[in-house]
């Protein structure tokens, strides 16, 4: 930035380019089609203000040493700052990332990645005009979500189904329509915070229903529920604690016993199952997750669960249960405010189709990733590291080793299950792990990794095979840059 001509602080500041000059540089002209004129002017002002501050500080520091800044140099710096401002704004945009963390249902990274069929359905069947509320046979108005609802009925054995924006909305709606302003009995052990701002008691209380807590944190008996019923009681609620487990001296009544108690007192029995598996996932080590069909068979009147946890679909709140109850919810004005859009229906429909076909474990990414054995991941990681070795020069200093470790289910599901995996540990001479993590995070596409003991670790469980190639290129580029 410095040249050694005579120093005159005021003269130097006068050399700063104007907004107009900056807009007419190659950088300004090049950015214009993407930014549009108004935004480009705003970015240019910010860039020039930054430059002015820096120049002012430098002039103040080095006035006696006879330092000057030429107009050309300042214009170059201004262009660089303009580009940086634009890039910084774009970084806050939502975009695709490679999830190399091994956290399968990663809430911050969009929970469940959609299946190929669900992606295709969004782009080809839903993005334009579609039959959202149109009945093909009659050419008249149809019911939105009919097909997805029918599939849910088939999968759970419930009489009826309804789809809203997410499971928190579903719980709120169920209590508003079916319980408020009456009382809802809930075990103290189930008044939990599920993460992502969902505190069971907060949302439930907002509905206008009154929560009647029974039992203790670790033990609640059927008789505790029975004793709490009175004339105002409308409902017994069971909440799956999701990301939270009490182990040891615990007790809670069987779902079928609670159903019997509720019905003998003329009450509704509602279960918020949370992640809610449609098929038994015990084979994947997930034996604690409620299977929705089993709850329906045990006599639960209405069950809610998320679309983007173990179901592996888009964000949605799924409500299944008795036909008369579902119709009451459907006819409530609040349903209109919580309904989902055509993109969500398209993705959900395809996700449910895979479950009905019996191909969910192969087709649905979340389930496929969870089903991957340690041996499979080990084999992929070994091949990946050989390919990386071929691409990366010895003198880059990039080292890698393969160690045993654990993946995470995530999304508040199966908190005690850590599927065995292998991890690729990356280290580089004179380059701290946090800097490598940052490099990967800011690459294109961003690669999100875990840091363990100040080292970057990669778990290929959550990386698809096509993303492996991109990851390889990004690591090779990094290594090459470090050898230059
Ligand atoms: C995750 C979860 C919710 C919230 O679901 P969203 O779809 O994120 O709104 C509610 N209840 C339970 C039991 C959960 O596990």
Image (cartoon, rainbow, N blue to C red):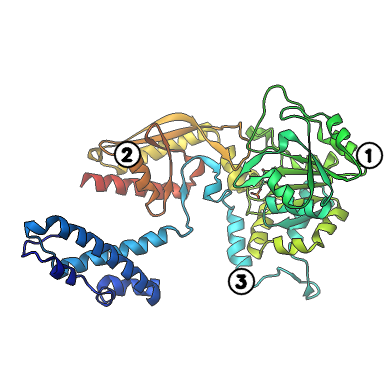
- Farthest top residue in view: 249
Q: Nearer the viewer, residue 208 or 338?
A: 208
- Earlier residue among tags 2 and 1: 1
- Residue position for label 3: 128
Residue contact at pointers 3 and 2, CB within 8 angstroms: no
Q: CA distance from mark 3 to mark 2?
A: 46 Å
State which quadrant residue 120 falls in: bottom right
Name the residue located 38 percent from the left edge and 77 percent from the top edge: 37
Q: Which mark is residue 372?
A: none
* 369 vs 119: above or below: above
The spot of residue 76 in percent (x, y) is 21, 66
Q: Nearer the viewer, residue 358 or 412?
A: 412
Q: Tell which tag, 2 or 1, sits nearer the viewer.
A: 1
Report the quarter where the N terminus lies: bottom left
Q: CA distance from mark 2 to mark 1?
A: 68 Å
Q: Is residue 36 visible?
A: no
Q: How many marks?
A: 3
Q: Is residue 154 visible?
A: yes
Q: Tell which tag, 3 or 2, sits nearer the viewer.
A: 3
Left or right side of 324 for 437:
left
Q: Label 3 neighbourhood size at 10 Å, few (<14), some (14-19), many (20+)? A: few
Say which element carries label 1.
Answer: helix
The spot of residue 462 in percent (x, y) is 51, 43
Q: Tell which tag, 3 or 1, sits nearer the viewer.
A: 1
Say which element carries label 2.
Answer: helix
- Earlier residue among tags 3 and 2: 3
The spot of residue 449 in percent (x, y) is 43, 42
Name the residue located 35 percent from the left edge and 68 percent from the top edge: 43
- Residue position for label 1: 264
- Residue position for label 2: 389
Say which element carries label 3.
Answer: loop
């Amino acid at each position: 930035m410095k040249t050694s001509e005579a120093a005159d602080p005021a003269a130097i500041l006068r050399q700063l380019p104007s907004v107009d000059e900056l807009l007419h540089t190659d950088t300004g002209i090049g950015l214009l089609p993407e930014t549009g004129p108004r935004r480009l002017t705003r970015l240019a002002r910010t860039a020039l203000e930054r430059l002015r501050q820096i120049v002012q500080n430098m002039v103040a520091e080095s006035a006696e040493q006879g330092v000057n800044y030429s107009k050309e140099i300042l214009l170059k710096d201004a262009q660089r700052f303009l580009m940086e401002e634009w890039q910084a704004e774009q970084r806050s945009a939502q975009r695709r990332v490679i999830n190399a963390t091994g956290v399968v249902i990663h809430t911050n990274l969009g929970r469940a990645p959609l299946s190929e069929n669900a992606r295709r359905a969004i782009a080809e069947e839903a993005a334009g005009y579609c039959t959202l509320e149109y009945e093909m046979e009659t050419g008249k108005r149809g019911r939105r979500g009919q097909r997805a609802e029918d599939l849910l009925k088939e999968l759970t054995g419930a009489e009826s189904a309804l789809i809203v924006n997410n499971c928190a909305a579903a719980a709120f709606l169920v209590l508003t329509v079916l319980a408020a302003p009456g009382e809802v009995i809930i075990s103290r052990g189930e008044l939990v915070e599920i993460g992502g701002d969902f505190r069971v008691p907060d949302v439930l209380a907002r509905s206008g229903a009154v929560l009647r807590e029974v039992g203790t944190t670790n033990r609640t008996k059927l008789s505790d529920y029975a004793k709490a019923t009175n004339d105002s009681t409308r409902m017994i609620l069971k909440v799956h604690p999701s990301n939270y487990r009490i182990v040891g001296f615990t007790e809670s009544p069987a779902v079928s016993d609670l159903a019997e108690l509720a019905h003998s007192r003329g009450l509704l029995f509602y279960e918020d199952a949370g992640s809610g598996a449609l098929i038994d996932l015990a084979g994947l080590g997930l034996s604690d997750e409620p299977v929705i069909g089993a709850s329906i068979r045990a006599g639960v009147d209405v069950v809610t669960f998320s679309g983007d946890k173990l179901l592996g679909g888009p964000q949605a709140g799924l409500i299944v249960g008795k036909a008369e109850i579902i119709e009451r919810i459907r006819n409530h004005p609040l349903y209109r405010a919580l309904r989902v859009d055509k993109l969500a229906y398209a993705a959900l429909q395809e996700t449910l189709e895979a479950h009905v076909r019996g191909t969910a474990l192969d087709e649905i990414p979340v389930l496929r990733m969870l089903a991957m054995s340690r041996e499979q991941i080990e084999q992929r990681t070994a091949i990946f590291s050989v390919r990386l070795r071929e691409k990366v020069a010895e003198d880059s200093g990039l080292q890698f080793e393969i160690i045993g470790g654990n993946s995470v289910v995530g999304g508040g599901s199966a908190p005690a299950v850590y599927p065995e995996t292998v991890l690729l540990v990356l280290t580089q001479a004179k380059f701290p792990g946090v800097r490598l993590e940052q490099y990967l995070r800011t690459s294109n596409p961003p690669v999100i990794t875990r840091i363990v003991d100040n080292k970057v670790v990669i778990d290929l469980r959550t990386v698809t095979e096509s993303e492996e190639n991109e990851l390889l290129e990004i690591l090779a580029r990094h290594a090459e840059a470090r050898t230059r």
